[in-house]
Amino acid sequence: MRFVLLLVLLAPARAQEPSRNTIPSILVHGEATVSANPDEANIDIGIVTQAPSSQAAADLNARQANTVMQALRTLVGSASIKTVNFAVNPNYRYPKDGGAPAILSYTANNTVRVVLDDISKLRKVIDAATQAGANNVNRLTFALHDEKAVRARALAEAAKQAHAGAEALAASLKVKLGRLLHVEEGQPVIISPAREIELGKSESMEQPPILPGNIEVHANVKLTFELIQ
């Protein structure tokens, strides 16, 4: 956890007549980072099929996707599953002599997103999808279901650091802190590194554990205090 202090003493410009309303003040900048364990996972599961025609590839993909989704529903329910992408694309063969390419087959790609509010089921969900016909996990990210509490902690720590810095500066300058004149909140930044998983065949029946790590919420605030001589 760190903080940065910026001292600003407000005073009228020399070329102007001093203003009676000028308030000597001090501006401090506090930063804090709070870590939290994720309690939500977002998984993109891909179903890829190939066939001689686009319709055959789409039909085969639909059957395979329905099997995968049925397996997922038994674990997480229908509300946590949705289709986020579907595409059918031709596969070309390019002649060595530079002639016109010919279509060899078609590939259908269906991506299903699962929002998992119990990350202890993550391995079961991936295994169930794989056994039902899923080909890959395109994206796996971890998140906080309700980040308000962690965000509040980060802001509170940042404000605490800024206040402590203001008191230290005031003491070193032989002045006292007066009223809190202004508070400015920076936008908290949430850092959640993505995880990429390949569903290839493993030589061992033991699958490596998935370690989500921590999610970090970084916040910063600026506080302006009146200075009392």
Image: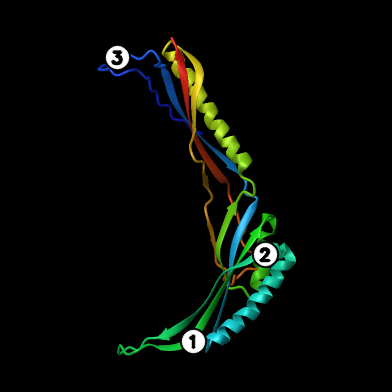
Position of residue 182 in the picture relative to residue 156 (left or right): left
For the residue labelled by badge 3, is the local secondary structure a helix, a strand or a loop?
A: loop
User: Where is residue 111, by image quadrant?
Assistant: bottom right
Are there few (<14), some (14-19), or many (20+) residues within 10 Å of tag 1? some
User: Where is residue 22, by image quadrant?
Assistant: top left
Please say if 76 is above or below 90.
Answer: above
Position of residue 147 in the picture relative to residue 178 (left or right): right
What residue does disc 2 label?
Answer: 125
Q: Which residue sits at x=49%, y=15%?
A: 177
Image quadrant containing the C terminus: top left
What residue does disc 3 label?
Answer: 17
What residue does disc 1 label?
Answer: 105
Tell me which amino acid carries mark 3: Glu
The answer, for residue 132, to whether it is visible in the render is no
Q: Disc 1 or 3, which lies upstream in sequence? A: 3
Q: Position of residue 221 (x, y in %)?
A: 49, 32
Residue 137 vs residue 190, the one in the foreground: 190
Of labels 1 and 2, the one closer to you:
1
Residue 205 vs residue 228, the one in the foreground: 228
